[in-house]
Amino acid sequence: MPRTKSKPKEHAPLLNGPVGEVMSLSEAAAYLRLPEAEVARLVHAQGLPGRLAGTEWRFLKAAVQHWLSCGSPTWETRKSAILEMAGKYKDDPDLEQIVEDAYRQRGRPITEDGSYKNFSS
């Protein structure tokens, strides 16, 4: 009877990345040697790179290492980044409609007279 080749074993996909590359909140806190609450605060206060996936935090180890090596941004660099972002949309032809739609959804007028048109004039 001839031998048939067996199928190669399929490996389960790595859903959370290689072990050690993606950290949970407790793992990131241990890595940074900080309490978990402080790590969560640093995400909002100092831009520690992390993602909230459902109800659980995930941190990419390389991104945390990069964040550590860069130091805290100064007020000047933050202001510059904010102004740069604001300027990106000044010539967007859809911006007026987007803003108008947002105000309508919130039930608020754009102008003092209660109108929505010509708010940029």
Image (cartoon, helix red, strand yellow):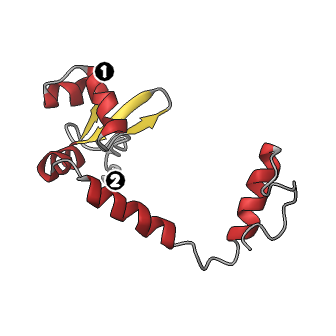
Q: Nearer the viewer, residue 85 or 58?
A: 85
**Does 83 sit above or below residue 57?**
below
Provide residue 17's location: percent of width, then percent of height: 30, 44
Callout 1 amino acid = Ala
Provide residue 28's location: percent of width, then percent of height: 22, 31
Residue at the spot x=34%, y=64% of the render?
A: 80
Q: Viewed as shown, does residue 44 lie left or right of 38?
A: right
Q: Viewed as shown, does residue 32 lie left or right of 78?
A: left
* Image quadrant in which the C terminus is located: bottom right
Q: Nearer the viewer, residue 51 or 22?
A: 51
* Residues packed near mark 2 inside 10 Å, few (<14), some (14 to 19) or many (20 plus): few
Q: Viewed as shown, does residue 11 lie left or right of 29?
A: right
Seen as rendered, the residue at the extreme front is: 112
Residue at the spot x=38%, y=41% of the render?
A: 15
Residue at the spot x=49%, y=72% of the render?
A: 87
| Image-quadrant location for residue 29 | top left
Provide residue 63's location: percent of width, then percent of height: 24, 49
Residue highlighted by disc 1:
37
**Does 77 sit above or below residue 94?**
above
**Does 4 sit above or below residue 25?**
below
Q: Viewed as shown, does residue 84 lie left or right of 29?
A: right
Callout 2 amino acid = Thr
Q: Secondary structure at mark 2?
A: loop
Provide residue 50's location: percent of width, then percent of height: 34, 40
Q: Nearer the viewer, residue 3 or 109?
A: 109
Residue highlighted by disc 2:
4
Disc 2 vs disc 1: Cβ atoms closer than 8 Å? no
Q: Secondary structure at mark 1?
A: helix
User: Counting residues from the N terminus, which is met first, the one under dot 2 or under dot 1?
Assistant: 2
Q: CA–CA distance between discs 2 and 1?
A: 57 Å
Q: Nearer the viewer, residue 1 or 71?
A: 71
